[in-house]
Image (cartoon, rainbow, N blue to C red):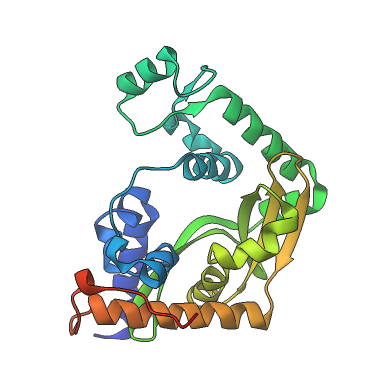
Amino acid sequence: MTKDQESKVLQSVLEHLTDDNKYYGEYGRQFLSNSDIYSLLNNPLNFRASSQESKALLEGRYFHTLMLEPNKLDSFYIVDATTRNTKVYKQSLAEQGVQMLLLKSEVDEINFIADRMRSNLQFFDLIYEEGNQFERPGIKEIAGHMWKGKADIIGKDHILDLKTTGSLKDFNYKSRVYNYDSQAYIYKKIFGKDLRFLVVEKRTGLLAIRDVSPDFLASGEHKVLQAIEQYEKFFGSNALEDVTNYYSYEVL
C-alpha cells in the first residue's frame, strides 16, 4: 500500500470514528482504548461487557456536550422530577425508551460548573482559542496493537481534557485510580502532545489545571503494557488461556 493509499484509509477510519455511534459501537471495537484498561487489569471477565450507563457517565457526557458541542444538547432527555423513584420519572423513562434520564436539578448543577469554567478568562481562552479542534478521534499502533482515542480539545500546545471531580483535594490521587495516567500516555502517542487536565469541582465550582509529569506518563505506559499483556493472553489471535480461568494472585 502506498503512502497516499494509507493516508486515504486513515482518513476514512477517522471519519467513521467521528460518529459516536461508530466510535463506541461495533466499528470502534476493532481498536483498544483507555476505557478497556480497567477491565483488562482488574477483571478481564468484564472486558467489553455491556453495561448500563451510570449517572456519572451521563452527567459527564452532558457536561462535555454543553461545553464543546452545545448544538447536540437536544439528544439528551431531561425530566423535572425530584428523584428517579418518582412516578413522573418512571413514566418519562418509559416514554423516551432510554436507559436513564437527567434530572433538571442535575442539569442545573452542570450548568453551574460549566458557567464557572467559561467565566474564567484563562480557561475560556484555553478552551475556545481560535484553531482548537473539538472531539477529534485518532488512532495509533502501540506495542503491536491499534489504539483509539477521542480528544476533547486539540489545542496549539496541548490536548485539553475537561474533568469534573467531587474533590479537587483528591484529584491527584484519583487521577491514577481512574487511569488518567494511561489516558495521558495513549493520547500523547496518538496526538503527539501532552495532555492537560482542566478540572472543575462539582459542588463549589473551584477550578484547577493539572499538567502531567514524566512519572505520570511512565505510570500510564506501564499500565498500557500490562493491559496489552492481559489482552494477548486472553483475547489475542494467539491467546494461550481461557479468560474463564482467570484469577488474580498477590503475596500479602
Query: Tag count in the figure?
Result: 0
From where the camera sits, is residue 27 visible? yes
> Where does the image place residue 4, in percent across and percent down from the top left?
32, 80
- Please tell me which residue is depicted at 62% across the width and 53% down the height of the picture: 163
Determine the residue located farthest toward the top in the rendered image: 87
Q: Is residue 219 above or below residue 126?
A: below
Displayed quadrant of residue 169: bottom right
Determine the residue located farthest toward the front in the rendered image: 252
> Where does the image place residue 237, in percent across and percent down from the top left?
18, 81
Q: Nearer the viewer, residue 242 or 206?
A: 242
Q: Is residue 12 above or below residue 55?
A: below
Displayed quadrant of residue 105: top right
Q: Is residue 169 above or below residue 158?
A: above
Q: Nearer the viewer, residue 202 or 17?
A: 202
Determine the residue located farthest toward the right in the rendered image: 121
Quadrant location of the N terminus in the rendered image: bottom left
- Please tell me which residue is depicted at 30% across the width and 60% down the height of the picture: 48
> Where does the image place residue 157, in percent across and percent down from the top left?
67, 71
Would residue 62 appear left or right of 50 to someone viewing this image? right
From where the camera sits, is residue 125 visible? no
- Please tell me which residue is depicted at 45% across the width and 78% down the height of the picture: 224
> Where does the image place residue 73, in percent across and percent down from the top left?
49, 33
Would residue 97 appear left or right of 41 to someone viewing this image? left
Q: Nearer the viewer, residue 40 or 73?
A: 40
